[in-house]
Image (spheres, rainbow, N blue to C red):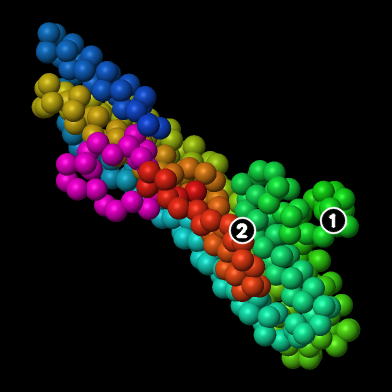
Amino acid sequence: MIVRQKPNALKIFFTLRGSIIPKIYYQILLITFLSSLITAIQHWYPSYFSSYGTAPFILLGVTLSLFLGFRNNASYQRWWEARGLWGQLVFDARSLTRQVISFIDDDTETGRDTQRQMIHLTIAFTHALRHRLRETSPWEDVERFVEPKHHASMRQTQNLPDYLMRLMGKKLGDSRRQGQYSELMVQNMDERLTSMTIVLAACERIHNTPLPFAYMLLVHRTTYLYCFMLPFGLVSSLGWATPLICAVIAYTFFGLDVLSEELEEPFGLAANQLPLSALSRTIEINLLEALGEDELPPAIIPENGYLQ
């Protein structure tokens, strides 16, 4: 995710980090070349192209703007919902840790072991969820927080975060049977586990349910057709300014199209997607600090204005 401050009026035209220009410059160059070719033909052979009015292009441009606006709103809603879910996960992880430390007696070895296991499993769940959403290998981050006796079965599971949640529920039940806390405290901590399960299910829903392909295809086709036809409608009135105007319009429409695709899947590693690694590391640091650990991992800081 881009975390830099807003660039000034001069730098705003030359900023590429986080911009969608690297992804659409081929389309912009293509439209500019086509517009220049049509302008040159119109200049040397004025009667070669018929003179078209701008009204059809205005109507089509307004329609395309509505389509792109709707799609960008839908994509941003997915992005913002995903950010809210990870904010809820931060809240649940900290709250569960506070409850575990506050209500489980740490005067005994059993109590300290229960605290450590519950907090470590919470950290493991956070890392496992991030890797599941990004479809990356989780074992390096997860196995160090899970007891070795669970490693074999953990590697065979189809849904690692859900498996870890079951381990946490089992540990909570074992602790209740040992009388480490009251029924009311069990209920409160189980509510936190339920909330974390809801976060998992909601993130999977966003990840596994993209916007309808037919709608995306319609927007793609309409954008290309509009930008290809636009020079024919502007060349008779704008002349040599046609390539510049068409390039700016192509940048706007193609840029909105690509940006909506990037926001539609908020869990990836693109510049404008969510910083799940930084959020996971924040949870890990907070929970280990609450557990009394001295050796904490370093916080993930932005590099060149980019937070991973």
Marks 2 and 1: which is nearer the front? 1
18 on left or right of 127 = left
Local crowd at mark 2 within 10 Å, few (<14), some, or many (≥20)? Answer: many
- The amino acid sitting under disc 2 is Cys
54 on left or right of 6 = left
- The amino acid sitting under disc 1 is Pro
Residue 31 seen in render:
yes
- Residue 110 is situated, as x and y percent measured from the top left of the image, at 84, 78
Dominant secondary structure of the residues highlighted in magenta in the image: loop
User: Residue 197 colored magenta?
Assistant: no
Q: Which mark is residue 148?
A: 1
Q: Is residue 194 above or below residue 240?
A: below
Give the distance between the C-alpha atoms of the residues marked 2 and 1, in whole angstroms.
28 Å
- Residue 287 is situated, as x and y percent measured from the top left of the image, at 62, 69
Q: Which residue carries the number 2 mark?
A: 203
- Residue 252 is situated, as x and y percent measured from the top left of the image, at 29, 39
- Which residue shows up at 61% across the image and 66% down it? 294
Q: Disc 2 or 1, which lies upstream in sequence? A: 1
Identify the secondary structure beneath mark 1: helix
**Residue 222 occupies quadrant:** top left
Local crowd at mark 1 within 10 Å, few (<14), some, or many (≥20)? Answer: few
- Which residue shows up at 37% across the image and 31% down it? 22
- Residue 291 is situated, as x and y percent measured from the top left of the image, at 66, 73
User: Which portion, as a residue range, is magenta?
Assistant: 1-21
65 on left or right of 71 = left
Q: Is residue 91 above or below residue 29?
A: below
User: Residue 19 colored magenta?
Assistant: yes
